[in-house]
Each structure stands twice: as structure tokens, then as C-alpha cells.
Amino acid sequence: MIRLLIAFALAVVMAGCATNKLVRITASLEPGSSDKTGIVFGSIGVGPSSEFDSQVFNFRETGGKDSGAIVFKNYFMARPPLDFRDDRSQGAVFFARLLPGDYEITGAPFYVGRGQFSYWIYSRHKFSIPFRVKEGHATYLGEFLAGTEKARNLFGIPIPATGYFVVSDRYERDFAILRTKEGVGELANPEKAVIDVKAIDNPFFRAGAP
């Protein structure tokens, strides 16, 4: 019961206008029906070592205050329909239709659901991962798979202590999936802008397959 209440509270906190089931954005970032827009997309999920119940990307217009989030919940009651699954990963493709401009990812917390002992894990170092939305373009950021590193608590029990995202280029797979999504519309001028892990220089992000 406690776990269900926590899940419900998180859903309320992250509520907003969704471009698809994985994306929550504030009303001020939501384009109007007559606005010129572009699409940013990628995939998010879990790798074989992940023990997180949720992983999140927080994003906003560069230097702005209004925010959005890409949320992947990895427990039975809230998991979105999976777009891919194999022996190394499972996850889904996200997309957001946004006004053209410069944006940044400013947070990537992980959630560990342990009833009354639930907790969030945040990066110890602030970061800003820039991306650009272009009118009439679909911009690909990459695949982001969560992984877990453990440490022992005061009772000697191994628990998730920190996390990371493995960033890979799965453009061909993810773009093919994107084209099947409801609400995507025309997808002219797709282009890759896979996040450069070396440029971020943060242990929360690690290089995967090119």
C-alpha cells in the first residue's frame, strides 16, 4: 500500500501535458496548434544491472525556468509499453514536439522504491546537456540505459548507491519505432545529435555502442 501511494504521489508531481506517455511538460512549453515546431526524440530504459524503479531526465529551455521531464517507470503498475526488449536492455522511445530553440537537460535522478525507505539518487555535480530543436526537423539524442552501482548500508545489505546512463547510438531502430508513434506526424529532415559523453564529463553518463 505504501509503495502504491508513493507511485501515485510521483505521478501527481510529474503531471502535465504529455507529448507522449514518457514526456511531461509544463503548459508554457506546450506548443500551440498553429505554432511551427520540431521534434526531439531518443530512447530510455534499463540495462541488465539496473535496480531502479524510475529514471528521469529533467529539461528546460536554455537558461529558463519552465521545465519538462522524460520519465521511464520500471515497475509493473506504471511501466509504459515497451518498444524494445532483449537480454541486455528494455525500454521505450520518447519524443517531444517543441518550439524551435535551444534546450538543456539539467537533471537525471534515479528512484529506488523501498516502501518507507524509498529514496532518490542525484548527480553530485551540476551539469547542462544542450540540444537544439529545429523547425520541421526530428533530432535524435541517443539511447539512454540506466545502470546501478551498489554499496552496503549500515546493516551490511547491498543497496543501490548510485546510478549512470549508458549512452549509445541506436538511431536506425529508434527512428523506425518513432515513425509508428501516434501524434508524431510528418518526419522530414531527421538528423542525429547523439549526446557526447566526453563533453559532459560526468560519471552519470557513460559511452556505449557508437
Image: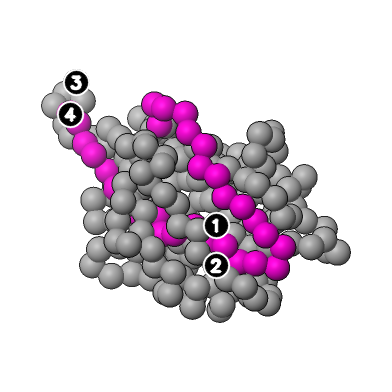
Most distant residue in the right direction: 34
Which residue is depicted at the point 55% across and 44% down?
Answer: 130
**Which amino acid type is shown beneath numbered disc 3?**
Leu
**Membership of 139 in magenta stretch:** yes
Q: Residue 152: which disc?
A: 4
* Circle nearer the N terminus (1, 3): 1
**Which residue is under mark 2?**
191
Neighbour tally class for label 4: few under 14, some 14-19, many 20 plus, Cα within 10 Å: few
What secondary structure is the magenta-colored segment mainly?
strand
Quadrant holding the C terminus? bottom left
Q: CA distance from mark 1 to mark 3?
A: 35 Å
Q: Nearer the viewer, mark 2 or mark 4?
A: 2
Q: Position of residue 87 (x, y in %)?
A: 23, 67
Which residue is depicted at the point 29% across and 61% down?
Answer: 209
| 27 vs 106: above or below | below
**Which amino acid type is shown beneath numbered disc 2?**
Glu
Q: Inspect this view and state whether residue 10 appears.
A: no
Q: CA distance from mark 2 to mark 4?
A: 43 Å
Q: Residue 154: which disc?
A: 3
Q: Position of residue 99 (x, y in %)?
A: 73, 55
Q: Position of residue 45 (x, y in %)?
A: 39, 57
* Circle nearer the N terminus (2, 4): 4
Q: How is the image coloured?
A: one colour
Q: CA distance from mark 3 to mark 4?
A: 7 Å
Q: Residue 96: which disc?
A: none
Most distant residue in the front direction: 199
Look at the image and give the residue range highlighted in magenta: 123-152
Q: CA distance from mark 1 to mark 2?
A: 21 Å
**Which residue is under mark 1?**
22
